[in-house]
Amino acid sequence: MAPTERLVVQDVSFTYEESPSPALTHVDLKVRPGEFLAILGHNGSGKSTLAKLLNALYLPTEGRVWVCGMDTADEDRLWDIRSQAGMIFQNPDNQIVATVVREDVAFGLENLGVPHDEMVERIDRALETVNMTPFAEKAPHMLSGGQKQRVAIAGILAMQPSCIIADEATAMLDPQGRRDVLSTVQRLNREKGITVVWITHFMEEAVQADRVIVVSDGGVVLQGKPREIFSQVDRMRELHLDVPRMTSLADSLRKEGMPLPDGILTVDEMAKEVTRLLCPSSSNT
């Protein structure tokens, strides 16, 4: 019986042909339906390799990966797997394959052999979902980086996936583009129940996930709720990772003697705790 979770990584190791050492070693991971999972790790930790295993771009050297109950080693299910686990890459230009936005969104559907009338309906619905309908007839190269990523998301949505795997999808965008793309994916997760695996090096993005895992030296070394993970400030720094700015500030203030609680993540939380300490009467009203 295949696993029932959306994504399952079972005792997986992976070694690149040109490398003497494995990129991943005995990794186990389960992602629940509708979960928003953030993956963190320094460069070379193995997080991008893990992403490609989840989309069957790579096959494990050892172990097994299941996507919606399908074994990624089953070549006959490859298109089914990739239509269920859509991938957003770091550079949106690498995903654009057509000269018109609408045609780019159609690309995956054409490969699946979706009938024309259904294809038109899916394309229109996908572009509307990511707020790109006004750009349907535009040339992709005329769009901003954030708009290109939303076109890439539309192409995935048109294939009606169960999962979206984003491999540092906001890394090359400006702050507004990052906010727009993350907001779009969060809305799809919340409103349509699409499972999301969000690989990022922006801690403020990871704070918004349901769960965070940290990858280091090819293995999962930490996992838990964002508040649990980021409370381990010294451990995160040992792993060459940052923490959210307010978490770092709270840690510094605690070391100077201010009795702030662990787990502060946002500006609002910091303001609340500082107000509580400095103005106890006002914080109780």
Image (tube, rainbow, N blue to C red):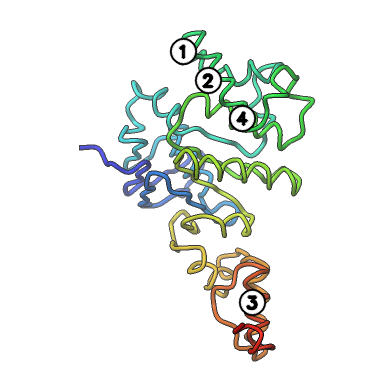
Return the residue found at the far right.
Answer: 142
Whole-number angstrom distance, CA of label 3 to CA of label 1: 53 Å
**Badge 1: few (under 14), some or many (20 or more) residues near its Cα, within 10 Å?**
some
Query: Number of numbered discs present?
Result: 4
User: Tag 2: residue type?
Assistant: Arg
- Say which element carries label 4: helix
- Say which element carries label 3: helix
Whole-number angstrom distance, CA of label 3 to CA of label 2: 45 Å
**Badge 3: few (under 14), some or many (20 or more) residues near its Cα, within 10 Å?**
few
Cβ atoms under marks 1 and 2 closer than 8 Å: yes
Q: Which mark is residue 152?
A: 4
- 257 versus 156 height, above or below: below
Determine whether, in the image, residue 233 is placed left or right of residue 222: right
Q: Which mark is residue 122?
A: 2
Residue named by callout 1: 114
Cβ atoms under marks 4 and 1 closer than 8 Å: no
Determine whether, in the image, residue 204 is placed left or right of residue 196: right
User: Tag 1: residue type?
Assistant: Val
User: Tag 4: residue type?
Assistant: Ala
Of labels 1 and 2, earlier in sequence is: 1
How far across and down, in percent of the image, does residue 117 sit?
Answer: 51, 9
Q: Which mark is residue 13?
A: none
